[in-house]
């Protein structure tokens, strides 16, 4: 188990601030964060390549602060795999074993890991003749063959072709689960993180702002910063009108909006920030029955503009209720646009799912 | 049309300079024809100069390499206080004239420390070691600069990855960095060796110009000209040109075959 307690590290103007993290054995932890948020810096601190200012790192109960990187036994898969250019595939994988002078076992161990990762046929190849996917597996084999106590993956899919990524996410996780190696995987790719994480954290500006399961984080980001990073739109300032066991009623721009009640208690009149997930905004087709849970949050709207992606459509809507005609962003499957005969300038009825309304802890 | 004129412009520069160098070489051939009737080829002296030049250049270049590799490694991979000042001192030989460097060495050997060295270790001034020392001082800045560029070109993250696999810093240096930099270091060696072969100013100041003693090829050319022996001077210039062209051509072929770093 890897445990980080109150870790701080400063380099120039950037700092990792009070990092606390725990990855249990056989668990797959994903650390999500935008570019420059300190993900790689944190990994390098765990590896012992950055001298941290304060804080402690424990690996299976052993404190690592005074242990050199080469003695920590932490596996590392760097972003661009960084296979040693002066060695072929076999020599790359065998490097760690040869350093540890396990020459008798070297060949067997390399063959064993090569079989597990299905790269037996690549062992004699030169590094320059490998595809991105092959290089990734070899770098993974090189890291795993020395049996690390924990594995750190730095954006492991950044050099993989887009179309191949999805399958490889699960394949990589399955291999690591089979080996039982606790893993920290850092990425800025939300889908990648969501797909593989047992547990997840969000790091922004050197600070881990939220940890939990992927579902907890994606459905209930802790604050506006987390929500924005997760790509959520429609973030507004509102005011609490009331809260009971079932609903929180809030007011925004003269509109009364119903959200599901929360464990957290809000005071009447309290200023809050809230977000309506774009995929929680529904188009109500006239003449069709309306679900009970949508009825409370129904508003008239006008389509301002529409953008199409491969399978979804984003629409900017003017909500016609209230004073300022606020603009909301709604996300639909593309087929809804055609089926409902939607077009710019059309006046429609929309409703918000209560589940998709998130009230943040911060103001 | 503008693209074409631009290309012609570029080629004009290249062709005119190559033609200028070729004209210089043909001028040598022409002069050789005129003087060959009157002069005899001084075999012994020229052979001595070639032998001494190749020997001293090889020893000084290898010594420079031994110093330059660790120094370039420190400069490439580490930051430390006063690094810019240290850099400026190490690269001084690149910007200071060789004669000034030779004079500095000569003055050093006239100080108590220099005199102590000469009387207790071995004689340097006006001896063969003076040539090696002069060549070493002239090429060391260039050697550090070239090898540092090679190290800078190699991603330091390779060494970090090697450390996570259990390698100590010396192991990453000898097993990852040096083998990866091998070709670049060899190219650098050939360049500094060629520069040492051509070294004159510092060598003549510290070692003097004594026939069959401290007579390297550049010194022999100087002595031949000084005694109006144009024929032998031209032969030596041709040998220098041959060595230079072979080395530079070798470096270019080598550089073209150099694998790009991952």
Image (spheres, rainbow, N blue to C red):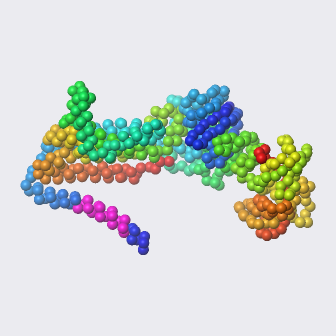
User: Residue A90 versus residue A11: which sits nearer the camera?
Assistant: A11
The image quadrant of residue A111 is top right
Please state if A38 lies on the left or on the right of B223 as rendered.
right
Decide: is A322 above or below B40: below
Outermost residue on the bottom side: it is B1
- In the displayed orientation, state which residue is furthest to the left: B38
Q: Quadrant of the N terminus of chain B?
A: bottom left
Residue sitting nearer the eye, B90 or A291: B90
- Over which residues does the magenta segment extend? B8-23
Q: Which residue is located at x 29 percent, y 39 percent?
A: B136
Residue depicted at x 73% and y 41%: A210
Q: Name the residue located 82 percent from the left edge and 52 percent from the top edge.
A: A238
Q: Main secondary structure of the magenta part?
A: helix
Q: Nearer the viewer, residue A235 or B40?
A: A235
Q: Position of residue A130 (x, y in %)?
A: 54, 49
Residue A322 visible here: yes
> Residue at the location (34% across, 43% down)?
B92
Estimate the x, y position of residue A201 in percent, counting from the top left.
70, 42
Q: Is residue A30 visible?
A: no
Query: Exactly how many numbered labels are in the figure?
Result: 0
């Amino acid at each position: 188990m890897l445990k980080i307690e109150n870790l701080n590290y400063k380099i120039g103007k950037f700092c990792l601030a009070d990092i606390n993290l725990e990855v249990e054995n056989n668990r797959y932890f994903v650390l999500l964060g935008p570019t420059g948020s300190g993900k790689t810096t944190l990994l390098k601190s765990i590896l012992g390549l950055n001298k941290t200012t304060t804080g402690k790192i424990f690996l299976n109960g052993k404190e690592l602060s005074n242990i050199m990187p080469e003695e920590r036994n932490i596996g590392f898969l760097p972003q661009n795999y960084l296979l040693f250019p002066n060695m072929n595939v076999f020599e790359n994988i065998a490097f760690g074993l040869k350093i540890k002078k396990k020459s008798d076992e070297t060949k067997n161990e390399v063959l064993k890991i090569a079989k597990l990762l299905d790269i037996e046929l690549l062992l004699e190849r030169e590094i320059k003749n490998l595809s991105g996917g092959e290089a990734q597996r070899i770098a993974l084999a090189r890291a795993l063959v020395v049996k690390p106590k924990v594995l750190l993956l730095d954006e492991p899919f950044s050099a993989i072709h887009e179309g191949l990524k999805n399958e490889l996410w699960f394949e990589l996780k399955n291999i690591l689960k089979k080996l039982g190696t606790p893993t920290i995987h850092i990425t800025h790719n939300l889908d990648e993180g969501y797909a593989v994480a047992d547990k997840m954290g969000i790091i922004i500006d050197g600070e881990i702002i939220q940890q939990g399961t992927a579902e907890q984080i994606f459905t209930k980001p802790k604050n506006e910063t987390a929500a924005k990073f997760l790509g959520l739109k429609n973030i507004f300032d509102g005011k609490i009108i009331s809260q009971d066991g079932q609903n929180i009623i809030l007011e925004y721009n003269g509109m009364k909006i119903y959200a599901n009640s929360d464990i957290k208690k809000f005071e009447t009149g309290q200023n809050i920030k809230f977000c309506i997930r774009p995929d929680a905004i529904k188009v109500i087709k006239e003449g069709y029955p309306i679900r009970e849970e949508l009825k409370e949050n129904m508003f008239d709207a006008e389509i301002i503009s529409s953008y199409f992606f491969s399978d979804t459509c984003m629409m900017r809507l003017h909500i016609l209720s209230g004073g300022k005609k606020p603009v909301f962003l709604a996300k639909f499957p593309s087929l809804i646009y055609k089926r409902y005969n939607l077009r710019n300038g059309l006046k429609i009825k929309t409703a918000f799912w209560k589940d998709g309304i998130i009230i943040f802890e911060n103001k | 049309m503008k693209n074409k004129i631009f290309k012609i412009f570029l080629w004009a520069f290249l062709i005119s300079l190559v033609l200028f160098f070729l004209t210089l070489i043909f001028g040598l051939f022409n002069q050789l024809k005129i003087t060959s009737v009157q002069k005899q080829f001084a075999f012994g002296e020229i052979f001595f100069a070639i032998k001494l030049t190749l020997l001293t250049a090889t020893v000084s270049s290898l010594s420079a390499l031994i110093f330059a590799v660790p120094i370039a490694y420190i400069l490439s991979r580490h930051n430390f206080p006063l690094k810019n000042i240290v850099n400026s001192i190490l690269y001084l030989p690149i910007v200071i004239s060789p004669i000034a460097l030779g004079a500095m060495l000569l003055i050093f050997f006239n100080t108590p420390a220099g005199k102590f060295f000469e009387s207790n270790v071995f004689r340097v001034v006006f001896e063969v070691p003076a040539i090696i020392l002069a060549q070493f001082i002239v090429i060391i800045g260039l050697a550090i600069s070239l090898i540092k560029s090679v190290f800078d070109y190699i991603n330091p993250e390779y060494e970090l990855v090697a450390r996570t696999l259990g390698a100590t810093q010396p192991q990453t240096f000898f097993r990852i960095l040096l083998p990866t930099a091998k070709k670049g270091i060899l190219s650098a060696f050939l360049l500094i060796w060629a520069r040492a072969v051509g070294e004159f100013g510092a060598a003549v100041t510290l070692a003097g110009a004594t026939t069959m003693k401290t007579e390297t090829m550049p010194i022999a050319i100087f002595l031949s000209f000084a005694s109006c022996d144009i024929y032998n001077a031209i032969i030596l210039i041709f040998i220098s040109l041959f060595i230079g062209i072979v080395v530079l051509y070798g470096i270019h072929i080598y550089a073209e075959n150099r694998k790009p770093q991952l």
